[in-house]
Every structure is written in structure tokens, then in C-alpha cells.
Image (spheres, rainbow, N blue to C red):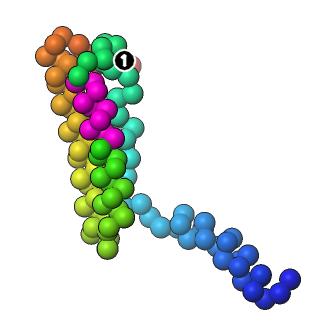
Amino acid sequence: MNKNHLLAALALVAAPTTAIALPMMYEEQAAHEEEGRIIRAPIGGVQNSRWFDYRTNVNETRKELASDLRHATDTEDRRDAWDEYGTELRHERVTYISHMAKKGYRIPQVYVGG
């Protein structure tokens, strides 16, 4: 194996470890927690305009994050992008839940303990 092939192989091996070593920003972590709260099925099984608006807004928010991260030039830009993303996801979820609650539909909740 010549020297160039050896260096290329070492670069491929080292690349994943450098990506793992970077700590996750607080804003990114909070946004990922909000992603876990995305409503996957319509409340009460009702597929109305509010449900479709919610899904559309979540998808647009994801696209906006991708665009913001692509155009970010420094850490502060990336923090702002992740913060805005998490805030928008939370806002869309709360708005959808609120509108459905006004119509008498609630998200099922399970309480553990006593």
C-alpha cells in the first residue's frame, strides 16, 4: 500500500470520530427534544384543516432549519437556527392542540403513579 492510500484510509477512519467528539449545542439538544414531541397522528383521529396546517407548518419549519444551517457562517448562526426551529415546533404543536381543544378534542394522556 503506498503512502497516499494509507493517508486516505486514515482520513476515512478519523472522520467519524471527529464528528462524534463535538459537543451538541444546548439549542440543538432542546430542538431535538421538541422533535420528539411532534404529533404523529391527528388528535381524536380527526383529519381536518388544522391537522393538515400543522403537518405543513412542521415540514416548512424543517426546510427552514436546513436552509438556515446551510447559510450559517458561525456558531451563533447555528445556535439561532436551532433555537428558532425548536421554538417554531413548540409554537405549532401548542397552537394545534389549542385549536383542537376548543373543538372538544384532547390529546390522550397516561398518568403513572399516585
Outermost residue toward the bottom in this view: 3
Above/below status of 26 relative to 5:
above
**In terms of depth relative to the viewer, which is nearer, 106 or 68?**
68
The answer to which of 109 and 83 lies nearer the viewer is: 83
- Residue at the disc numbered 1: 110
Quarter occupied by the C terminus: top left
Label 1 amino acid?
Answer: Val
Residue 51: percent from left, percent from top:
27, 24
* Magenta region includes residue 41: no
> Front-most of 61 and 22?
61
> In the figure, is residue 36 to the left or right of 106?
right
- At numbered mark 1, what does the secondary structure look like: helix, strand or loop? loop
Q: Position of residue 65 (x, y in %)?
A: 32, 54
Q: Magenta stretch? A: 50-59
- Which residue is depicted at the point 26% across and 31% down? 54
Work out whether 11 lies above or below 86: below
Main secondary structure of the magenta stretch: helix
Q: Quadrant of residue 99?
A: top left
Residue 5 visible within the image: yes
Q: Dot 1, how many residues are within 10 Å of its Cα: few (below 14), some (14-19), or many (20+)?
A: few
Q: Position of residue 64 (x, y in %)?
A: 30, 52
In which quadrant will I find the N terminus? bottom right
Residue 30 visible in rendering: no
View extreme (right): residue: 1
